[in-house]
Amino acid sequence: MARTSVRNIRSGASSSAKARVKGFCFRTQFKTCASMSTILVGQDKTPYKVHRDLICNQSPFFAAALRGSFAESSTQQLELPDIDTKCFDHVILWLYQNRLEPLSYFFKDGKATYFTLLDLYATADQLDIEGLRNRVLDRVAELAENTNSVPTPTDTWILYDTIRESAPLRELVLDLFAFKKTDVLIATHPDEWHPAFLRDLVCRLKRPGPKTLSRHALERWEPANWGAVKAWV
C-alpha cells in the first residue's frame, strides 16, 4: 500500500471523535501491551519502536494513523519525514516517563535557552499530543520565572513560523515580554525580531486589559472640591 500523507492523517484525526482516546495506565495496561509500531522519523527514516497502545492513547494523530482506515494501520509503520529526531527523542521521553529533561538541560553557557522547547511545542502540536504541549508550556513559564528571562529575537521566528497562530504558547511569550524587563536582551541580541511578533506585542502593550491593570495599584482620582459639587436639575 502507498504511504498515507501526514496531512491526510491529521484530517482524519481531527474529524473522527473515535480518535479521542482514553488515558493509558502503566500499572495495568503494560501487562497486555504487546503490539509494537515503528515510527520512521526524519529524512533518514530513523526507526523508533514504540508500544502502539501507549502512543495511540496519547495522540489522536497516531490513533488515526495506526488504528484507523489508513494503510499504516495494517503495516504498523508510519513515516514522519518532517519531524526532527532530536525533538522526537523528547517526545519518547515524555511518552514513557511523563517528564521533560531537568531544567538545567535548557541552559547554554549559564543562560536559559528556549529554542528546544519551542521546537518541541511545534512537534507536539503537529502530532496532537496535548499533554506534552501543556508540559512544555509550563516549562517555558518555569524557565522564565526562575531566570527572569525571555526568548531571544531568533526564538520569535520559531514561534511565528512553526507554531500555529492560536497556540497558547504565543500568548504566554507575549505576556513575558510585556511584563518582564528586556533591557539586557535587547543590548546583547542585535538580531532581528519577527515582524508579526512585534506587531502583536505592540497591540498587547496598547490594549493591556483587566489582567494587566490588576498588577498595578490604581487610586481613584477626583477633584479636591468634589464633595461640595451639587448637581443642577
Image (spheres, grey):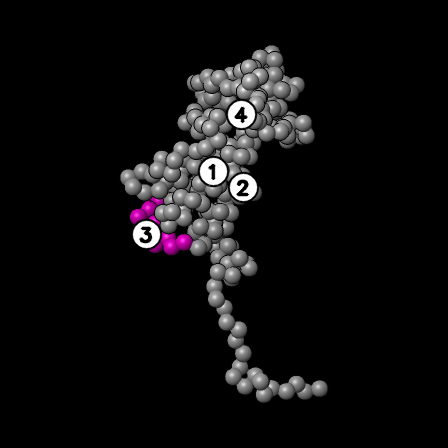
The image shows residue 39, relative to residue 180, as above or below, that is above
- In which image quadrant can residue 67 be found? top right
The residue where tag 2 is placed is 167
- In which image quadrant can residue 115 be found? top left
Amino acid on which the number 1 mark rests in the picture: Val
Identify the magenta region: 180-191
The residue where tag 4 is placed is 26
Label 3: state its secondary structure.
Answer: helix
Label 4: state its secondary structure.
Answer: helix
The residue where tag 1 is placed is 136
The disc, 2 or 4, on the residue closer to the chain's N-terminal end is 4
Label 1: state its secondary structure.
Answer: helix
4 vs 1, front mark: 4
* Mark 4 surroundings within 10 Å by alpha-carbon count, few (fewer than 14), some (14 through 19), many (20 or more): few
Of the numbered discs in the image, which one, if any, rests on residue 184?
A: 3
Tell me the quadrant of the picture where the C terminus can be found: bottom right
